[in-house]
Image (cartoon, grey):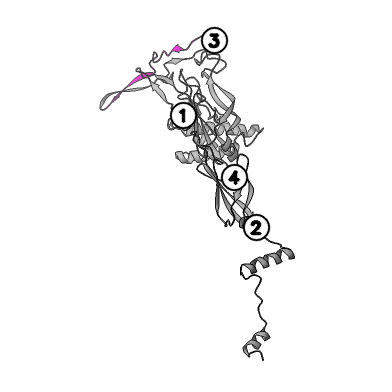
Amino acid sequence: MADKRDYYEVLGVSREANADDVKKAYRRLARKHHPDVNPGNNEAEDQFKEINEAYEVLSDGQKREMYNRFGHAGVNGGAGAPGGGGDYGFSVDFGGFGDIFDMFFGGGARQTAGGRPGAERGSDLRYDVELSLEEVATGVEKKVRFSRWESCGICHGSGAAEGSNPETCPTCRGAGQVRQQQQTILGTQIRVMACPRCHGEGRIVTNPCKECGGAGRVKKTVEKTVNIPAGVDDGNRIRITGEGEAGMRGGTTGDLYVFTHVRPHDRFERRGNDIWCEIPVTFAQAALGATITVKTLFEDADLHIAEGTQNDEVYTLKEKGIPDPRGRNKGNLNVIIQVQTPTRLNDEQRELLKQFAELRGESVGAHEEKGFFERVKDVLGGR
């Protein structure tokens, strides 16, 4: 494993970093090197895989402990290695495979009565996807590519070459454990520990499969068409059952979790399932009333402005907002009116506005300041 970089170096964190520090470092690097952000960049894709692999180990307490003790050999997932491995091959929502917000992360090895590890569920995978507000409003399909460990198609997960089978470990005789007896000043102490030869497996592969090298799993790149339902919000998580990594020793496949991130919009602001925007109208439209065209997330819509509409008044277009992901009604589009003061008037327009102001008894025009001699004349009574 000499060609692998230190996982802490990959994420740029110290060995004392806590779980939050590891997660923050991972998210920052994953977004920077994500294949969707760097299309056709093989170097970025390799870095993304390396980042995912490091995060999978350092975010898991047991795997991190094994890595700290044994290095890459402790988590490489090969035959005889103390623990599984593989990188977080991320993916986007696979519509129709799972329920929104069903977030029960499984995993972990099950111990049999003899102490030997039983079937181990495959790791869950994660994919972060960025969406526009328009995509959120209508739902969207995306093609995504990610890497994951899959059961070897040649040995079907056994790790043994064709025509052979794993053999019972001669050291522990299949128990996966050995007893160690030691004499101390307090008497005889007996320790039960994982078999050092089979690493607790209870069996060894003497003739490993050429396809997977005895690991029972192979790393593959998978491409899926993902259906993201309408109405998801920033930070929502979608579970896709069975699209994670293959388990060990016949364990079930893990799940895939999609985390959605909605980009800010240049015209609309989302508040729950409602959206808000500001629309400019002219002074004449606000005063006399008008019908204007408003661009929504779906199509253009007519908005009727009442006579005498004031600045910052709010008009609501029903069900022109975000659909509820649970199948309820859509939210609304709330339009904030911004009355625009006319500028660069020509002489005729200026005269008409003055006449309008005079009819309303309003004072308009700039106040002309009297000169010094005129003010002195006023003080002396016009003399």
From this view, report whether residue 109 is shown above or below residue 129. above
Q: Distance between the residues labelled 3 and 1?
A: 31 Å
Q: Distance between the residues labelled 2 and 1?
A: 77 Å
Q: Which circle's residue, 4 or 2, is located before the other in the chain? A: 4
Identity, as a three-letter code, of the amino acid under mark 4: His
Q: Which is more toward the observer, 357 or 259?
A: 357
Q: Which mark is residue 284?
A: 2
Residue identified by numbered label 1: 70
Q: Position of residue 29 (x, y in %)?
A: 56, 39
Q: Do the residues labelled 2 and 3 touch (CB within 8 Å)?
A: no
Residue identified by numbered label 4: 265
Q: Position of residue 72 (x, y in %)?
A: 50, 29
From this view, report whether residue 144 is shown above or below residue 80. below
In which quadrant is the C terminus drawn? Answer: bottom right
Q: How far apart are marks 4 and 2 (CA)?
A: 30 Å
Q: Which circle's residue, 3 or 4, is located before the other in the chain? A: 3
Image: magenta residue range: 163-185
